[in-house]
Image (tube, helix red, strand yellow):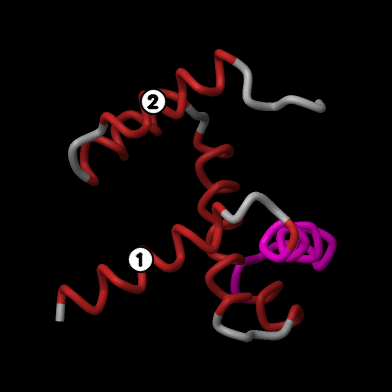
Amino acid sequence: MNNYRTKKLKRLATALLIAKDETQMLNFLRDLCTLEELEELGSRFQVVELLAAGKSYREIAKLAKVSTTTITRISHWLVHGEGGYRAVLSKLKKSKKSAK
């Protein structure tokens, strides 16, 4: 898909941004996704966080219960993607600091 930024995806992004808190977001995600999809999304983001923390692929595979192929794919997008992973990681890091 050359242009993934379709009207449908943009509408979904807007809907995700409307959730006011974690509970609303969790409820929306549960209504939107199957349990398997939610588990996969959670695992993928766990991989991102573990990669950013400098963990090895083997450690990540064991902790996140994903294949090294999946880790390689996620690592590629962490480094060569649109910057979304890095932006969110940065915001999470800042929010942890301000919560202290």
Is residue 45 positioned above or below 3 on the image? below
Q: Image point 67% across, 76% down: which residue? A: 62
The residue furthest top is 7
What residue is shown with label 2? 14
Q: Position of residue 31 (x, y in %)?
A: 38, 24
Q: Residue 79, position in %: x, y?
A: 71, 65
Q: Name the residue under label 1.
A: 92
Q: Quadrant of the C terminus?
A: bottom left
Percent coordinates x, y for residue 92 in the rendering = 35, 66
Label 1 environment density (alpha carbons within 10 Å; few <14, some 14–19, many ≥20): few
Q: Which amino acid does label 1 sit on?
A: Leu
Label the magenta part by its dominant secondary structure: helix
Q: What element carries label 1?
A: helix
- Magenta segment: 63-79
Please state which of residues 26 and 84 is positioned toward the viewer in this rendering.
Answer: 84
Q: Nearer the viewer, residue 100 or 24?
A: 100
Vertical arrangement, residue 49 with respect to residue 5, above or below: below
Q: Quadrant of the N terminus?
A: top right
